[in-house]
Amino acid sequence: MKLYYSPGACSMASHILFNEWDIAYTVESVDLRTHKTEKGEDFYKINPKGYVPALILDNGHTLTENIAVLSYLSDSKGAVKGDRYQFLEWLAFISTELHKGIGSLFGYSNGPQEVVQGIKDKVAKRLNLVNDHLAGKEFVFGDAFSALDAYLVTVLNWCPKVKVDLSPYKYINEYLKRMMFRPSIQKTLQQEGLVK
Ligand SMILES: N[C@@H](CCC(=O)N[C@@H](CS)C(=O)NCC(=O)O)C(=O)O
């Protein structure tokens, strides 16, 4: 399998899973401003959508969209342990509410303050739900690390950069601290050049 990624972007969730589950993989980075890959290819020719993640499967097919890519990786490892629909519910929530909510703040750093505040207020409501959910839990879903943790850690990692204050969320902070000790996460952060 080959993953097209950009350092620290949502594609990092898949990268974490490769390391967590010892999946054989290669990666190639994409410059999301020029849409050129590390090898100088036009990324639009690989993924006409122009965004990461794009996962090239061993059968040559290209899979995009985090919900599909993370479900595929989870299924290939038989890693959805528990109610599949609850798993999908969380995956959709992280993708459409958190990823798209927090992620949209990157584009608005100099945007109108009322727009920025409106997005932040909505994100805060979603983070409150996550915080309550994590009370007394080690992982987002069930009793093992899953794609949901890989994805949640990836999007929470953006918060300081877009000035979303995580200090009010006790359980999220404790969770993040634990997750940051995880070898698969440390390794991925290093491979993507985000820590030394
Ligand atoms: N709907 C896609 C969105 C993926 C996405 O937002 N990718 C961002 C990085 S986190 C990106 O590549 N943005 C560059 C662009 O849109 O051109 C998914 O859920 O996988």
Image (cartoon, grey):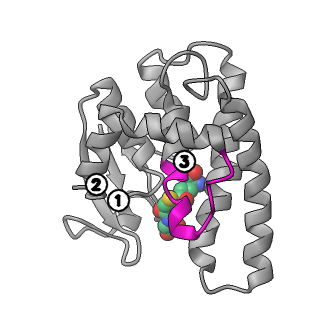
Residue 174 screen position, x and y as percent? 54, 37
In the image, what residue occupies the spot 72% across and 75% down? 116
Range drawn in magenta:
154-169
Tell me if the residue at label 3 has its CB under 8 Å from ligand 1: yes
- Which of the numbered marks, if any, corresponds to residue 192? 2
Q: Is disc 2 surrounded by few (<14), some (14 to 19) or many (20+) residues within 10 Å?
A: some
- In the image, 58 versus 95, the foreground residue is 95
Tell me if the residue at label 1 has its CB under 8 Å from ligand 1: no
Q: Please report whichever mark, 2 or 3, sits nearer to the chain's N-terminal start.
A: 3
Q: Is the residue under label 2 in contact with that under label 1 (CB below 8 Å)?
A: yes
Report if residue 102 lies within the magenta region.
no
In the image, what residue occupies the spot 48% across and 30% down? 72
Residue 110 screen position, x and y as percent? 62, 86
Residue 99 screen position, x and y as percent? 61, 53
Q: Is disc 1 surrounded by few (<14), some (14 to 19) or many (20+) residues within 10 Å?
A: some
- Type of amino acid under label 2: Glu
| Residue at which label 3 appears | 65
- Type of amino acid under label 3: Glu
Q: Quadrant of the N terminus?
A: top left
Q: Is the residue under label 3 in contact with that under label 2 (CB below 8 Å)?
A: no
Q: CA distance from mark 3 to mark 1?
A: 17 Å
Above or below for 109 versus 167: below
Q: CA distance from mark 1 to mark 2?
A: 5 Å
Report if residue 160 lies within the magenta region.
yes
Q: Nearer the viewer, mark 2 or mark 3?
A: 2
Secondary structure of the residue carrying numbered label 3? loop
| Residue at which label 1 appears | 7
Report the side of 179 relative to 186 (left or right): right
Q: CA distance from mark 2 to mark 3?
A: 20 Å
